[in-house]
Each structure stands twice: as C-alpha cells, then as structure tokens.
Amino acid sequence: MAEEGIRLTAEQKKRRRARNIAIAAAIGALVVLFYVVTIVKLGPGVLNRPI
C-alpha cells in the first residue's frame, strides 16, 4: 500500500522556510534581549568578583 502524504509545492516550501527563519530570528532576539537585561540588572560589579 503506497503512502499518500501531503505534497508541498515549491512556493509552500519557500514560505515555510521563510517563516521558520523569522521565528528563529525572533527567538534569537529574545535571548539577546534577556541576556542584556540580566547584565544591566546585575550591574558592572558582576565582572569584578574574585576568582
């Protein structure tokens, strides 16, 4: 029995890839934003700790 799945057109594949890249960029931007906010809240003294 041959499986019949959903076949995407080239345009649908292109749109899916563009959407995935946009989602990845948004998640990356959030990660950077959270990192920057954390560093700002901790202040510059966090780098001057004894080792």
Image (cartoon, grey):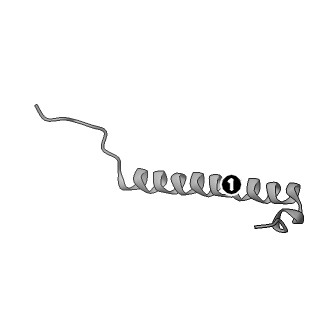
Q: Residue 18 vs residue 9: left or right?
A: right
Q: Residue 47 vs residue 11: left or right?
A: right
**The N terminus lies in quadrant:** top left
The residue under label 1 is 31
Identify the residue at horizontal 82%, vertical 55% (top origin).
Answer: 37
Residue 15 position, x and y percent, is 48, 53
Q: Residue 3 vs residue 39: left or right?
A: left
Query: Vertically, is 42 above or below 48?
Result: above
Identify the residue at horizontal 18%, vertical 35% (top origin).
Answer: 3
For residue 41, which quarter of the picture? Answer: bottom right
Residue at the outermost front position: 51
Instruction: Report the front residue among 6 and 49.
Output: 49
Identify the residue at horizontal 89%, vertical 64% (top origin).
Answer: 45
Instruction: Report the front residue among 23 and 29.
Output: 29
Q: Residue 5 vs residue 15: left or right?
A: left
Residue 38 position, x and y percent, is 80, 54
For residue 26, which quarter of the picture? Answer: bottom right
Residue at the outermost top position: 1
Residue 9 position, x and y percent, is 35, 50
